Image (spheres, rainbow, N blue to C red):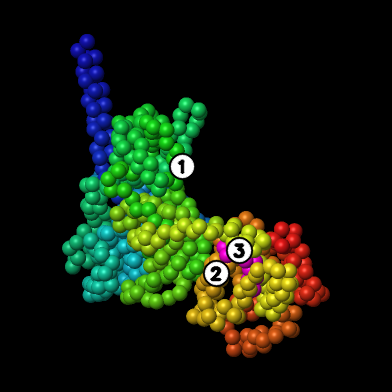
Amino acid sequence: MARLSVVGGADESATDRLAARIVADENRGLLRFLTCGSVDDGKSTLIGRLLYDSALVFEDQLQSVERDSKRSNAAHGGEIDLSLLVDGLQAEREQGITIDVAYRYFSTPRRKFIVADTPGHVQYTRNMATGASNCDFGVLLVDARQGVLTQTRRHACILSLLGIKKVAVAVNKMDLIDFDQERFDAIADDFATFAEPLGFDLITPIPVSALKGDNVASPSEHMHWYHGPTLLGHLETVDVSHKETSGPFRFPVQWVNRPHLDFRGYAGTVASGSVKPGDEVVVHPSGICAHIGRIVTADGDLEEAQEGDAVTLTFAEEVDVSRGEVLSAPEGPPAVADQIAARVIWFDEEAMLPGRTYMIRCGGQTATATVSALKYKLNVDNLDHVAGKTLEMNEVGLCNLSMTKPLVFDPYADNAETGSFILIDRFTNATVAAGMIEFGLDRATNVQWQELFVDKGARSALKGQKPCVLWFTGLSGSGKSTIANTLEKRLHALGRHTYMLDGDNVRHGLNKDLGFTDADRVENIRRVAEAARLFVDAGLIVMVSFISPFRSERRMARELFGDGEFVEVFVDTPLAVCEERDPKGLYSKARAGLIRNFTGIDSSYEAPQQPELALETTDTTPEGLAELVLTELKRRHVV
């Protein structure tokens, strides 16, 4: 019996030790950090070195990397290429670069880590921003031979914009400059001077050689002049703890959970704060108040849900809530506005054009958004604010955006979850930008629609006609204005009330300040579409004759009108015929280089895909084509 007692005691002791180890492991902090910087600064090699020196590489992985190093001739002086531990895509290994964001987990006795290896090439800046959005700390690499480059500055700006306040500047490849202290100090001073306006709380410069291992996991024998921490030592000890108070309660509804008739819950992740059963919450943007009934999870109900918890909430009352709405505590509600100011990082090869419509997605909320103004662009070399009309790929700017419906948000500085958004191209569904909300615009709440006693129906009834807009689009010289002019003459003879908006005429007044760049063309169409809507609201039949070369702007114009009020008329005349006609001599000037951004020559025309009417002008007179349009109007009971 005594022996059994001893064995039992030993088993209990082993169990206690195991439990203690599990608790200790769980209590180790987790640091999410990324490596970034310009191309070929050694980011992947650095992470490979961290994994290798931390003894976290399996033997079969090491053997595979050794084989690949020899095959690709990527090893330096017969040394293993540790970047291959991270670069997993075939294209990355062939080119020796990082394309996608690679995530790796490793741990030391002091801390657990998730590291994001982000690409340095300019065209993959969007991937870097994606990786940074989930991190608390940044390791910004600088090639000791090259110093601080434009891409280094761009990545530093993005880190600051995304709220990462502590960074380590790893000056890599010190072995290639003979571990020169003066060169290291000059790079550290250069970066500190540049980054001062970015508002970092801590910048820690560390000289390293990722290839040789100097100052990565253990102190360097070649840099006795450096007395700071190693990179791994700094990662193990740097404090990135968040504020003790996580902010007011925010819960974006991601999904209405209704598995059967007797249950209705609202699933999502707590973005900030906490909530308990019985707490009063407010549903935004409706403003409806309700009380939490239960906090449901797969493992049973909770007594409290805190920031980061994925739960399903039920209400004690019968309340209608939809995906995209946001729950908050009654005190400290979020902002609600249909116009915002935001910092935008542009990802797409096609430039951002003010006036063009995009889809905005903020949490579970989606709406149609228009970039109403670009206030300034950020020069990443000196952080100056630069005037501009467009944002090109990888540029950062402060923009005003207007939405078709109110957006529920917090400023990004207060809550990154409810203060960030993406913009999506409505035709390709590609993500074209990421944004951080600064504030709502006051005019969004101060300006209200004035109720009118006489509406569009009353005005059109008085005229005895159905108002609509006939949008004539086609190349210059296609015959748009001639056909529209002829049609208006026929309608006038029939006693109809009409108005014609012609591209050239409008540029003498309303749009006299606009040129012919893509950005100005978009604004040109936006203004004309708004003017046409006012005429339709007055009960008129409106002829709009504009080249309007972009599908997105024609779609934007269409969405301003009610069902059946927008008739797209494609005047389908071949470019060769338009050039032969050339009534204003514009094509010959464009061919001679005297006119730039001329549609059909050096600026594209996107033909309608499904117009209500397509008119071929080569074999029919303008009068005959006007009669075809008139027949369509009669079919639609417009006249």
Q: Is residue 144 magenta?
A: no
Q: CA distance from mark 1 to mark 3?
A: 37 Å
Secondary structure under tag 2 reads: helix
Most foreground residue, 467 or 109: 467
Which mark lies nearer to you, 3 or 2? 3
Range drawn in magenta:
536-547
Q: Is residue 436 left or right of residue 347?
A: left
Which mark lies nearer to you, 1 or 3? 3
Secondary structure under tag 3 reads: loop
Q: CA distance from mark 3 to mark 2?
A: 13 Å
Earlier in the chain: of badge 3 and badge 2, it is 2
Most foreground residue, 431 or 486: 486
Most foreground residue, 178 or 445: 445
Q: Position of residue 50 (x, y in %)?
A: 33, 54
Q: Which mark is residue 539?
A: 3
Q: Position of residue 264 (x, y in %)?
A: 45, 32
Tell me which amino acid carries mark 2.
Answer: Ala
- In the figure, residue 189 lies in which quadrant? bottom left
Q: Is residue 572 left or right of residue 184?
A: right
Q: Position of residue 57 (x, y in %)?
A: 38, 48
Q: How many marks?
A: 3
Q: Which mark is residue 322?
A: 1
Question: Is residue 314 visible from the viewing direction of this image?
Answer: yes
Q: CA distance from mark 2 to mark 1?
A: 35 Å
Tell me which amino acid carries mark 1.
Answer: Ser
Residue for point 67% across, 65% down: 568
Tell me which amino acid carries mark 3.
Answer: Gly
CA neighbours of label 1 inside 10 A, class few (<14), some (14 to 19), many (20+)? some
Q: Quadrant location of the N terminus?
A: top left
Residue for point 55% across, 66% down: 534
Q: Which mark is residue 531?
A: 2
